[in-house]
Image (tube, rainbow, N blue to C red):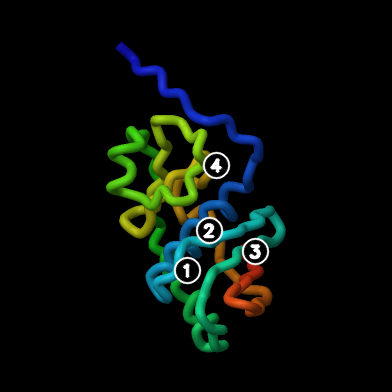
Amino acid sequence: MEENIQLNAHNKQEYPPMHTTEHILNQTMVRLFGCPRSRNAHIERKKSKCDYELPEALTEAQMAEIERRVNEVIDQHLPVTIEFLPREEAAHVVDLSKLPEDASETLRIVRIGDYDACACIGAHVGNTSEIGHFKILTYDYAEGRLRIRFKLVE
């Protein structure tokens, strides 16, 4: 008997390469600086931005390291896979703190190789080889918020 999984509706169609890159950037920030995933993101085809809560501004060298590490992950040609887990089980795999209160009982978990796992209902590539390369355009820091603006290049 096939299970009928009911997920929340999704109201936006992301550009899959950019949206997948957001996941990689988020995990890179968590690993490098121990901060939470982006608290605010605006992901578009041409350019995107993510905000991170950090106690101090980053140096140019740290920003260059973020760019290098994101591209290193992309260049590994990692598979992007999807699995469905009950919320209780998903809580052992991913951070559910930003999950909306009305989220469905079954969650869609997106994995990027062994690098990242996140509950997400958006569109993604099937492999990081489909992304291109990550380029930080600008960044600024104010009152505990680092904003990174970026794009993808061939």
Q: Find disc 4 in the rendering and name its residue.
A: 122
Tag 1: Cα neighbours inside 10 Å, few (<14), some, or many (≥20)? many
| Label number found at residue 49 | 3
Q: Is residue 41 left or right of residue 103?
A: right
Label 4 or label 3, whichever comes before in sequence order: 3
Label 4 is placed on what type of residue? Gly
Where disc 1 sits, the SS reads helix
Q: 13 and 50: which one is in front?
A: 50
Tag 2: Cα neighbours inside 10 Å, few (<14), some, or many (≥20)? many
Tag 4: Cα neighbours inside 10 Å, few (<14), some, or many (≥20)? some
Label 3 or label 1, whichever comes before in sequence order: 3
Specify the quadrant that holds the C terminus. Answer: bottom right
Where disc 4 sits, the SS reads loop
Q: Quadrant of residue 40?
A: bottom right
Q: Find disc 2 in the rendering and name its residue.
A: 21
Q: Find disc 1 in the rendering and name its residue.
A: 70
Q: Are marks 4 and 2 in contact (CB under 8 Å)?
A: no
Query: What residue is at 49 percent from the left and 75 percent from the top?
Result: 66
How much space separates mark 3 and mark 1, taking CA atoms?
15 Å
